[in-house]
Amino acid sequence: MPHLDAHAPHATAVPQATAPARPAGRVAARRDPFLDNAKYLAIVLVAAGHAWEPLREGSRPITALYMLVYAFHMPLFAVISGYLSRGFRATPRDITRLLTAVAVPYVVFETAYTLFTRWSSEDPDRPITLLDPLYLTWYLAALFIWRLSTPIWRSLRWPLPVALVIAATATLSPSIGNDLDLQRVAQFLPYFVLGLCLKPHHFHHLTTRPEPRLLAAPLFACALLLAYWAVPHLNYAWFFHNTSATALSAPAWYGPLMTLTTFGCSTALTAAFLAHVPRHRTWFTPLGTGTLYGYLLHGFIAQTAEHGDWYAAAWLRGPIGELTVTLIAAATVTVLCAPAVGRACRGSSERAVGWAVHR
């Protein structure tokens, strides 16, 4: 999921989206390597999580790791995306950048994933529609809606409690359909709003004070042990935030309770993760600028692997195989996050929307 006002002008969120425009004449500040580092490391977790999906059956350790990662990686993206949206004022230039960075990639990749799904015969009759996000594209639909609503959240006195009420209410509403994946939009909303509420000093304290770093490792260790215990006892689909409580075969009142529980858990793990992200420039810092297209492109490979015969070898079900799959996933998404890939894709988006808007 930079400093959009007083911060560095990060053009992208995690997975990545163009930041609001700077006022005319304002001198561009340097990108903050901390957020680029966080975005790259987080996108590696996404790729690993998708690579583990076919290995979950019969493997309690992999399922526990999967549950742990899903407990915080998308909340982390939403938090950083919210932080990057702090300067969004819905000006014409802001809207143009939102169209270029979010709307156009959504249209392109929603169409591409639909055609890919038809070709792979998973759903040969699926129509091309922009109202029912397929696979990874839900995040772009959510980000578009969240960012457009930013001025509203910035004007509220207590935005985070309001967002939590909306998320909790969504879990009580099985009638919310697939249109724009509004269940996820609503249930992940508190993390985006939390990002809007954060200031630069919050990240500074996380990475410079000793307490967060000292607590982070024990927290993750305890969370992993808890996840291992919870594999046969808890439906990890609660962390997907994509359906109502009754759809998960739980009483309706579980929904608001799990909203607060998962929010606390995910926020703590997000903070622990960020506490160990390097603040200085590293070899992978430039890769943080390309996380949107690393996110979107790796999905084609992950889907091909899962529905093909890539996991047929028995040795992949052991520790060496699982480690190999994880490393391949990390290497693949690293290549796809290369700055050259991001520049090419962003350039295409800018040309696609350039003819239709005022500059």
Image: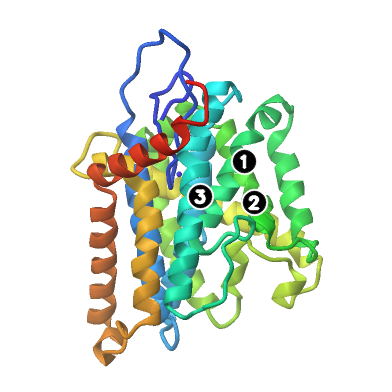
Whether label 1 touches label 2, CB < 8 Å: yes
Q: Residues within 10 Å of mark 1 (few under 14, many from 20)?
A: many
Q: Residue furthest left?
A: 283
Q: Quadrant of residue 36?
A: top left
Q: Amino acid at mark 1?
A: Trp
Q: Considering depth in this image, is 115 or 271 the residue closer to the camera? A: 115
Type of residue at label 2?
A: Val
- What residue lies at 27% left-to-right and 84% top-to-bottom? 316
Answer yes or no: is residue 17 visible. yes
Q: Secondary structure at mark 1?
A: helix
Q: Earlier in the sequence, mark 2 or mark 3?
A: 3
Residue position for label 3 = 106
Q: Which residue is mark 2?
A: 185
Three-letter amino acid code of the residue under disc 3:
Tyr
Residue designated by label 1: 146
Choose the circle earlier in sequence order: 1 or 3.
3
Instruction: Estimate how packed mark 3 is, as few (under 14), some (14 to 19) or many (20 or more) residues with alpha carbons within 10 Å.
Output: many
- Distance between the alpha carbons at the discs numbered 1 and 3: 14 Å
